[in-house]
Amino acid sequence: MTNHLFALVRENLSADPAARPFIETPDGRRYSYADLLARSAAYANALVAAGVSPGDRVAAQVEKSPETVFLYLGAVRAGAVFLPLNTAYTATEVAYFFADAAPAVFVCDPERRDALASVAEAARVGRVLTLDAAGRGSMAEAADAQAPDFADVARGPEDLAAILYTSGTTGRSKGAMLSHDNLASNARTLVEAWRFTDRDVLIHALPVFHTHGLFVAINTVLASGGSMLFLRRLDAGLILELMPRATSLMGVPTFYTRLLKEPGLTAQATRHIRLFTSGSAPLLAETHAAWQARTHHAILERYGMTETSMSTSNPYDGARVAGTVGLPLPGVALRVVDPDTGAERGPDEVGMIEVKGPNVFRGYWRMPEKTAAEFRPDGFFVTGDLGKVDARGYVHIVGRGKDLIITGGFNVYPKEVEAEIDAMPGIVESAVIGLPHADFGEGVTAVVVAAADAPDEAMVLAHLEGRLARFKCPKRVLFAAALPRNAMGKVQKNLLREAHAALYRG
C-alpha cells in the first residue's frame, strides 16, 4: 500500500524534479519539486524522531512559509494527522484543541512558545517545537539534522490525513476528520474542473491553516504539478505586480474588493491570468460586475466547507453566473430538502442543502452522536446551509440554518462572542449577527441591551481584545432598548439583520 495522499505528488513528478519549480517567495527563495521531496522527507524523519506514530496528531499554529507546507507534507508522509490552527487563536482557545485532539507534537511560532508551553504541558502534549515565518526554529533545525529520504508510511484512502476544527451549533468547536481520499479526490476533481496543468502558476496569498489555502489551493497545485508564487498575506499591490508571471489566483471576496481599489487593475494588467476564483464567503454581485468591467474576466465562484472541501463550482467553460455557486462537481450529489421532513424540494424552492460524495468528511472527532445527527441514513451530509437549485441546475446559497458568520473567509459562531459580551458588568444581553460587508463578506456586529451604567462601544471592544481571536471581534457594537423576539421568546436575528443591513455600505 502507498501513502494515498502523497501519491498525488509522486504521480505528477517530472523526469527531473529539480528542474520543476514548486514555490517562489517575493524575497527570492525558490524551491523545486526535488526540494519538496527532500524537505518533506526531513520533516517526516524529524516528526518520527520526536515520537510521532501513524495516526498521531501533529498540531501547528505557525506563520505562513514554505516550511509550513513541508511540515504538512512531512506529517502526511509520516502517517500522522495534520492539525492546522488559526494563528489568531488565543492560548485559551488553543487549550481546548489540545484537550480534544491530544496532539503528540505541537509546532508554534518561537515568540509564542513561552505563552503556549504551559498550556501544552497541562494537556500532556508530547513535544513543543517552533517554526517562524522565515522557516527558522527548533522544528526546522530538527529537520535540518535529518536525512532527505523517507519511506512513506502506508496510508489507505480512508485513513485520516487531517483534522480541521469548525464551529459547533452549541459554540463548541468540532474537529472535522478528513481522510486521505477526501483530500486527494477533491484535488483531482478540481484539476479537471478548473483545467490546471503543470504550466500553471498560482498566486497564493491565502492563509494555510484553512481548508481554502491549505487543501484547495496547495493540493490542486500538487495534483497538477504546477507552481506557486507564495505570499505571506494579502497584498493587493504585490498581487497586481505578480500577475504577468502567473496564470491563476484563488481568493476570497476581500481579495477582489482590495484589488478593485488599485488604479493599475486593468484588462491589460490581468491578461496573463486565465482563472480567478472566489470562495469562503459570499461575493457580492456588484463586486463580480465591477471586476468583469475592469478586467474582462468573470470571477469563478464555488461552494465548499471544512467538512466537504469543494462541492460545487461555476463552469470553467460556460456561464459563470453572479450570485450562484455553480453546479455540483463531478462525483458530488447535491439535493435541497425540506429541513423538517427531508422531502426533496423542486427547482427554485428553498431548503436545506445536503451533499454526498468522496469529498465528504469522515465525521467529527470524538463526537459520534453529532456525526450521526449530521448524516441522513442514505449518506447525505446536512450542510446547515439554506439554498435552492434553479432550472439550469445552478446552486444558490440564500442563508445558513446554523447561525454561522463567515467574515473574510473565517467562521465565527455568534454564541461564543455573545458569551463574552454577556459576562460584562452592565450588559443585559447581546445578539451577534453578520451584516453585508464589501471587504469581508460579512461584518461581525453585536447588538447589545445594556443597563444605565453600561460600558460604551469602545469599552466592549477593549474587553474582547485578547479574549477572542481578532477576526471574531465585532466591527461595531450597537445598542438597543430590547432585542426582537418571536412568540416562543427566541431572538429574531433576521429582523436585526434587516434593520442594520446598510451599516457597512459606503
Image (cartoon, grey):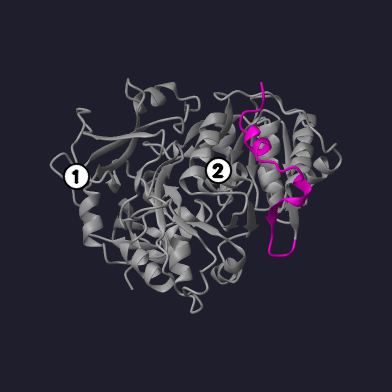
Residue type, numbered disc 2: Phe
- Residue 74 x %, y %: 71, 37
Residue type, numbered disc 1: Asp
Name the residue that disc number 1 marks. Answer: 348
- Residue 263 x %, y %: 48, 79
Q: Would residue 396 be seen by someone viewing this image from the given angle? A: yes
Q: Is residue 21 magenta?
A: yes
Observer-nearest of 224 and 59: 224
Work out which quarter of the rendered image holds the C terminus and state it: bottom left
The span picked out in magenta is: 1-28
Nearest to the eye among marks 1 and 2: give it.
1
Label whose residue precedes the other's in the sequence (1 or 2):
2
Name the residue that disc number 2 marks. Answer: 215
> Neighbour class for label 1 at 10 Å: few (<14), some, many (≥20)?
some
Kindly identify the residue that appears in the image at 36 percent across and 36 percent down.
169
Kindly identify the residue that appears in the image at 55 percent across and 70 percent down.
240
Please identify the quarter of the rendering in which residue 294 is found: bottom left
Mark 1 to mark 2 CA distance (whole Å): 32 Å
In the rendered image of this protein, does residue 165 appear above or below residue 200? above
Q: Is residue 489 left or right of residue 154?
A: left
Kindly identify the residue that appears in the image at 48 percent across and 63 percent down.
255
- Dot 1: element: loop
Observer-nearest of 104 and 251: 251
- Residue 246 x %, y %: 59, 62
